Every structure is written in structure tokens, then in C-alpha cells.
Amino acid sequence: MATPQKITPFLWFNQEAEEAANFYISLFKDSKILSVARYGDAGPGPKGTAMVVEFQLASQKFQALNGGPHFKFTEAISLMVDCESQEEVDMLWSKLTANGGQEGQCGWLKDRYGLSWQIVPARFIQLMKDKDPKRTQRVMQAMMTMKKFDITRLEEAYAQA
């Protein structure tokens, strides 16, 4: 029997929860909408619109609320994606920054809904675990010059004599 997820990220949207959830599930394998609770006659949202959307991204459960304009996302919390290849980094970066998203530094971005993401190649984490501080420093210095991670440039910095 599968253990239920004990902690579920809960995302507050103005009125884009269902749209955002559908966008996010289009990006990751093992993702789907689990349920949508809609506002009824009592409101406070328009009858029939999504109130809470429960969805799964890469087997991780999330909930999204259409709670109105009272709260906004900040960079104080982000979703980090462990990417296996440059192609995955490039695809996610492109799709998440499209249509109003914003590039940040060092693998960070904001999507069109204002949610912050870190798109990080697994290889970067591997390189940073090297016991040679000179190598890790060079990798870190290379990373600090990047917006979207470039695995080839990280590898080149790591390999310098």
C-alpha cells in the first residue's frame, strides 16, 4: 500500500489555478489533474469556476486555489526541477518563460503566473559535490554568469587545469 503524501504544496492564484495546473501537467511525465472543486451559488468566486484544483506533477501532489488577488508569489519559495539533460533544461526553460514568464539568474525563472522555478541539471549538483574546492569554485563562478544552465560550460569550467 502506498504511503499518502504527508506534505502537499498549496499554491494561491488569483483566478488562474485551473489554467496553471493544466499548463504544469503538460510539462512533466506522470502528471494529471486529480480533482477540481468548483464554486457554487454561495461563492465567493463565480459559480462554476474552479475553487481548488488538486493535481500531480511527476508523481508529486499539489493543490491550487483561486483565492483572489490578496496574495502574490515571491522568490522566497520556488519549485526546483532536477533535469537529466540539456534538452530537458532547454525545454522547461523555454516553456516556463514563454508568454510573460521572466528569466532570472543561476537557473531561476518566473513563469507567466509568477511562480518561481529553479531549472537545475543533475550534472551541476554532481560537479558541486567534488572534493576539490578549486573545481567547485570554477563551476560556481561559471554558474554565476548564467541565466539558463549550460551543462557544457559547467563541464568546461570543471575540467580547467
Image (spheres, grey):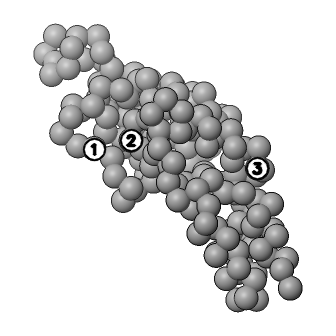
Residue 19 shows in the view: yes
Rendered position, 23 above or below 12 = above
Report x, y in % for residue 3: 56, 48
State the SS at label 1.
loop
Where, by quadrant of the figure, is residue 146 drawn? bottom right
**Apparent side of residue 25 relative to residue 151 in the rendered image (left or right):** left
Q: Quadrant of the C terminus?
A: bottom right
Residue at 61% over, 43% down: 93
Which residue: 70% across, 89% down? 133
Mark 2 and mark 1 lie on one chain; the one further toward the N terminus is 1
Residue 41 x/y as whole percent = 16, 10
Please tell me in which quadrant of the rendered image residue 10 appears.
Answer: top left
Q: Which of disc 3 and disc 1 is earlier in sequence? A: 1
Looking at the rendered structure, the secondary structure element under dot 2 is: loop
Vertical position of residue 128 compared to residue 12: above or below: below
Residue tagged 3 = 86
Quadrant in the picture for the N terminus: top right
Between the residue at mark 2 and the residue at mark 3, the CA separation in whole angstroms equals: 24 Å
Q: Which residue is mark 2?
A: 114
Please give the label number shown on residue 72: 1
137 to 153, vertically: above or below: below
Determine contact: label 2, label 1, CB under 8 Å: yes
Residue type (three-letter) at the residue carrying disc 2? Gly
Residue type of the residue flagged with mark 3: Gln
User: Dot 3: what SS?
Assistant: helix
Q: Is residue 9 left or right of residue 125?
A: left
For disc 2, the neighbor class at 10 Å (few under 14, some 14 to 19, many from 20) is some
Image mark for residue 100: none
- Judge by depth and name the residue closer to the eye, 100 or 123: 100
Determine the residue positioned at 27% across, 31% down: 14
